[in-house]
Image (cartoon, grey):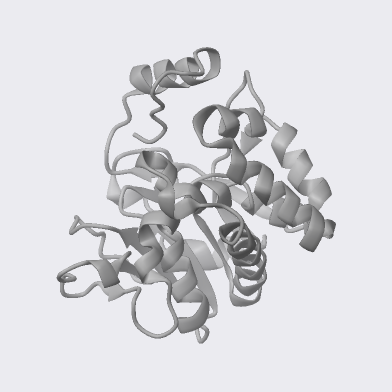
Amino acid sequence: MKILIATHKPYQIPEISGYQPIMVGSALRDEVPAGYLRDDQGENISSLNPFFNELTALYWAKYNLRDEDIVGLAHYRRYFGTKSSHNLADILSQEQIYDALEKVDVLLPKQRNYYIESQENHYLNAHKNEPYFMMQDVIKESFPEYLSAFQQMGQSKKAHLFNMAIMKQADFQSYTDFMFGVLNQVAQRIPYESYEGQDRRVFGFLSERLMDTWLYTNHKTFQDFPLVTTEKTNWLDKGTQFLKRKFFKNTNKKVHF
């Protein structure tokens, strides 16, 4: 088992069997802390980290962790937990992960519910619109069996976000085949290198809409887990920004906290 902890800076990392920090964008950094994996060794897209974010860790894992039975991704600020908390002691243990995967195919963070808008509208209110519609075109043309689930995801008010998941190797390969297959084609059709600000992180945002698309198309069973977060969220600011994006389209957009 290898649960990668994606980070872009030195950080307090829990010492739990099966978990391993990985410095994303290692190819762009002067040094990587001792004990951290690098995402620029073997087959990789490390240099594309400004556009792919934590997905460079998933790409590295796809080609360099093929001997692991179970592969997963957490963030330096977010982990799968037994309960919602800020206490690292509540992070799922290796034994709890094994037990859960005996019952379901995929472990996921608790769904985010936006209540007053669909996932498609939420994305379009927060990000450049062209990449989303281009992704829809790519799925329609090259992955038509996924189109129905993609549209279902778009109309839903709930989604599994953060690109976090834990699953067995065969499912991990299936998911990443689909996800990178879609994103690679989108990358050929949009001028992402000219994007500025948060829009440069386009593929990390797009991919969040592909997990449920893959999940429901392939009829995978799953279990949601609460998040253990190392930093507290300012929910007043987060809620205010959400409403500004929805009702005041021309305001500066802030989507990550």
Q: Which residue is pictured at 30% across the width and 75% down the height? A: 38
216 sits to left or right of 189:
right
222 sits to left or right of 253:
right
Q: Which residue is pictured at 77% across the width and 41% down the height? A: 151
Residue lying furthest top in this view?
247
**Relative to the observer, which residue lies in front, 191 or 214?**
191
Question: Is the residue 230 above or below the residue 169 in the image?
Answer: above
| Image location (x, y in percent) of residue 197 | 35, 40
17 sits to left or right of 225:
left
Quadrant occupied by the C terminus = top left
| Image location (x, y in percent) of residue 233 | 33, 30
Q: Which residue is pictured at 37% across the width and 70% down the height? A: 46
- Is residue 199 visible in the rendered structure shown here? yes
**Relative to the observer, which residue lies in front, 233 or 176?**
176
| Image location (x, y in percent) of residue 247 | 53, 12
| Image location (x, y in percent) of residue 110 | 54, 41
Q: Which residue is pictured at 41% across the width and 38% down the height? A: 84
Question: Is the residue 235 above or below the residue 46 in the image?
Answer: above
- Is residue 81 visible in the rendered structure shown here? no
Q: How many marks?
A: 0
